[in-house]
Image (cartoon, rainbow, N blue to C red):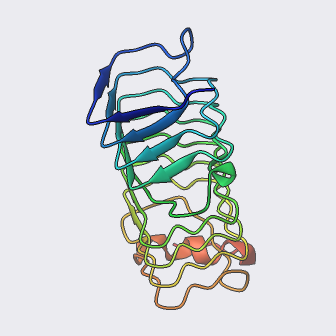
Amino acid sequence: MEQAYIKDETIERFDFTTIPLKMGEYECCTFSGCDFSNTDLSDIKFFDCVFTGCNLSLAKMQKTVLRDVQFRDCKMLGLRMDECNKFGFGVRFENCSLAHSSFYQKILKKTTFKNTILQEVDFTACDLTEAIFDNCDLANATFDNTTLEKADFRNSYSYSIDPDKNKIRKAKFSLVGISGLLDKYNIDIS
């Protein structure tokens, strides 16, 4: 099958649920207001792309390449980011909803999550060294055997992180959010 190579294109308000995105490489492209929900993005390569106001919920992403890709104002429910290609994986999220998604075993060093809903997201065995969680809702997110060294949680909320099961050396937390580190003790902090 012929692979497309698309560079410096802007694709606006396209419904990829009816006509699938062509297999291939997309470099420095912008996708704005597009619907990718329940589509198959497997084996497609995205380099330096921006997704703005798109719906990617439940899209299949087996071996999808995401290098220096930004997601802004996107709905991304139930994504298996853990199935994306590991080589050079680099993403940034702003004003997105990633609820019920999985980053299991992903290397996410210095990744920024800004104003993002991360409810019930699986960060098990991830490397989130120096990641920034800026004003994020982490209710019921899973952190187990996760590296959170120098990660910044100061402006985020609803997280529950067990310091005995995660590496949190020099991670940053606010005084208000400190109770999220003590949940396992079932104590009342006032």
* Nearest to the observer: residue 130 or residue 144: 130
Q: Residue at x 62, y 54 (%)?
A: 85
Image height of 2 relative to 92, above or below: above
Residue 43 coordinates in the image, percent (x, y): 62, 41
Residue 161 coordinates in the image, percent (x, y): 63, 72
Q: How many marks?
A: 0
Image height of 184 relative to 92, above or below: below
* Nearest to the observer: residue 25 or residue 151: 25
Residue 189 seen in this snapshot = no
As drawn, the residue found furthest toward the top would be: 18
Q: Residue at x 41, y 21 (%)?
A: 34
Q: Quadrant of the N terminus?
A: top right
As drawn, the residue found furthest toward the front would be: 2
As drawn, the residue found furthest toward the bottom would be: 169
The answer to which quarter of the image holds residue 42 is top right
Q: Residue at x 41, y 71 (%)?
A: 110
Q: Residue at x 56, y 8 (%)?
A: 18
Left or right: residue 96 versus residue 138 is left
Residue 62 coordinates in the image, percent (x, y): 69, 43
Residue 82 coordinates in the image, percent (x, y): 67, 54
Residue 94 seen in this snapshot = yes
Left or right: residue 84 versus residue 112 is right
